[in-house]
Amino acid sequence: MAIVDMSKLSVIGLNDNKPDILRDLMALGVCEINSQDEKLLDSQWAALIKRDSDSNAGLNADVKISEVSSAIEVLDKYFTGKKPFIKCRKPVSESEFEEKNSAPDETEKFAIAVNEKYKKVLYLKSEENNLITELSELKPWLDYEFPLEMKETKYAAVIHGTIPETVSLSELEAKLQAEGNGGVISVVSKDDKTVYAVCVCLKEDKDDILTILRQEGFNPVSFADISGTAKANTALCSEKLEGVKKELLSEEDGLRDMSQNVGSLEFYYDDLIIERDRYRILSNILRTDKTFYFDGWFVKSCEAEVKALLDKYGCYYEITMPEKGESMPILLKQNSITEPFQAITDLYSTPSVNDVDPTPFLAPFYFIFFGLMLSDAAYGLILTAGSFMLLKMFRLEGMMKRLVKMFMFCGISTFFWGVMFGGWFGDMFGISPAWFNPVQEPMTLLVFSLILGAIHLFVGMGLKAYLLIRNGQALDAVCDIFLWYLLLIGIVVFALGGSISPAVSEIGKWMTIVGVVGILITGGRHKKGIGKVTGGLGSLYGITSYLSDVLSYSRLLALGLATGVVSQVINTLGKMVGGGFIGVIVMVVVFIIGHTFNLAINTLGTFVHSSRLQYVEFFGKFFDGGGTAFNPFNRRTKYVEIVKEEK
């Protein structure tokens, strides 16, 4: 439950051994190799070494990865087997992984064949759409017996087009006759909105006729690249379409058959990713004609394995401890209880070397706050059971695993507070609370929430005091933390102690006075001149921020009431229809839909607001963040997890 100790590593080895060293170092997965940009800018280093890289090999690997990735996406579309709800990496041994990738050339040819076949499918689908469009365009002209390419005769012009159905054809022809142009309109077909017609006129009058027709909404139709009648072309298109459909079906059936071998592509994809990453890491390695150099960090507890690997290849290496305050990558280590809550820390920021790992301290508060906000025993059981099933049914990893496991723990908290407050799908079952009903006694929950908030803030302040003392700033811890403890606790004791004893109230008064005086005197200690006096007043004004921070915890009341009140409204709506068979059906439907929505939306709100209390109120007291997460050189596969075999 802390930041893992790191060791610095510098290595010099022979270029002949470099591929094997990188392969084994990658399999070990505990070393981070630093960028060497600073050394390349140093004139002394630059005169001796150069950057080691193989850009062509890396580019070639990227091209292959793109090809294989596209093929996998295609086969996933046509895979007819059962697909998992959540796709997780499959564990395989190193020997099995090597065996599956024993024929990379054949697998690459298979990927190319898949992509070529899919290109053919896309072409055929485009052809199918074009033919369907052409058939729809020809359909209105099926009764037109003349060739569609005929645009004119020796003396006449033929104009094909559409006219809005609202236009009177008789009036339009009369208008053409009145202009003295003599155009004749023949209707081919019509539908609800459009009339498909042909206008025949003298060639010399064509432009004038078109002008008049356009004024009435006429839209000319062009049959480019079409010869023969509409009926003949429709038959030809239908025949082509039938052939395209058969060919398309055959190609897609071929892809469905090929999809059964998608696993081989997934293995090959991961093998290419490993190969690509080995080429990329070369840019972080320096070399001469005979040797190479790199430096970085590794997990201190793995020192024996790192030494054994480097000794195996006769490398010269140096292992040192980081200097105090030196920037280094951060790796957090948790136990099985706090590990899920590291997701909250990771979503915010990685701790810096000067921070403490906040996860063990935020975990209990997040657990409590989440349950208080959702506070329905039935919802808690659903959340716990659902999360537990996901963990058992799927091999989740990383952030997703942490979040699901965290929700499982938070479901337990939700169940506990639901029992305490009597929430079982709201008031559906009328079960009495073990403590009190927040809807009936909201002030009790408000006071309890503010007390929890004060404790949360005090823990954050205590962590800040610890960091100050650890860094040799004990006086700052006394002045900036412990005097505030004295003041804030003194105010509470003074205000509430009278109900216990006048002596207790008197103690609170003097605690408050000492705290105020101490803050006024020491608040400006780092300033000069008049700032030493005004600095104390400014520090004392900070009491308003503590008040606002404590009031922020009233959201525990607000979210808790929201869950309970909405649940009660859903139950009331379900019962409004009355009894009988129909009433029961309606009530069940409203119950399922309403409570599913309430659980989903309030779980999301609870997650967000519980996180906010950590990020703003709690972290604001002691946590800086901004660290760099440990990024070891390892096998970052997508589809399989390579499990190391015991030797």
Image (tube, rainbow, N blue to C red):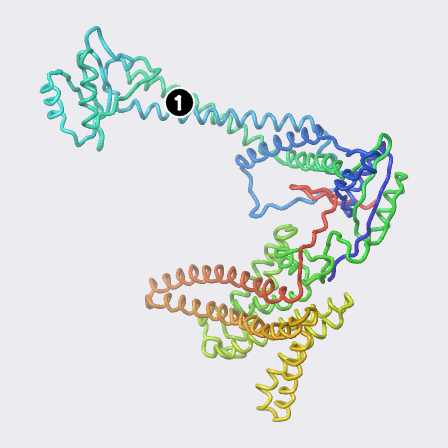
For the point 64% across and 93% down, the residue is 503
Q: Is residue 86 left or right of residue 325?
A: left
Query: What residue is shown at x 35% (from left), y 17% (from top)?
Result: 236
Q: Quadrant of the C terminus?
A: top right
Q: Secondary structure at mark 1?
A: helix
Of 410 and 30, nearer the camera is 30
Asked which quadrant contains residue 408, the reply is: bottom right
Percent across and percent down for residue 496 are 58, 86
- Using residue 305 as the reference point, say whether residue 131 is left or right of it: left
Residue 151: x and y in percent read: 26, 13
User: Which quarter shows the N terminus?
Assistant: bottom right
Pick the front one: 526 or 106: 526
Q: Is residue 81 visible?
A: yes
Instruction: Report the front residue among 54 and 82.
Output: 54
Furthest toward the front, the residue is: 529
Residue 198 lies left or right of residue 109; in this view the side is left
- Where is residue 215 drawn, in percent x and y? 19, 26
What type is the residue that disc 1 sits on? Leu
Q: Can residue 453 be seen from the camera position used here? A: no
Note whether 619 is above or below 481 in the view shown: above
Could you tell me residue 14's position as x and y percent?
87, 34
Image quarter for residue 132? top left
Residue 226 vertical placement versus 254 (above, below):
above
> Few, some or many C-alpha atoms within 10 Å of disc 1 (few <14, some 14-19, many ≥20)?
many
Residue pointed to by mark 1 = 241
Q: Nearer the viewer, residue 129 or 342?
A: 342
Picture layout, residue 568 above or below residue 109: below
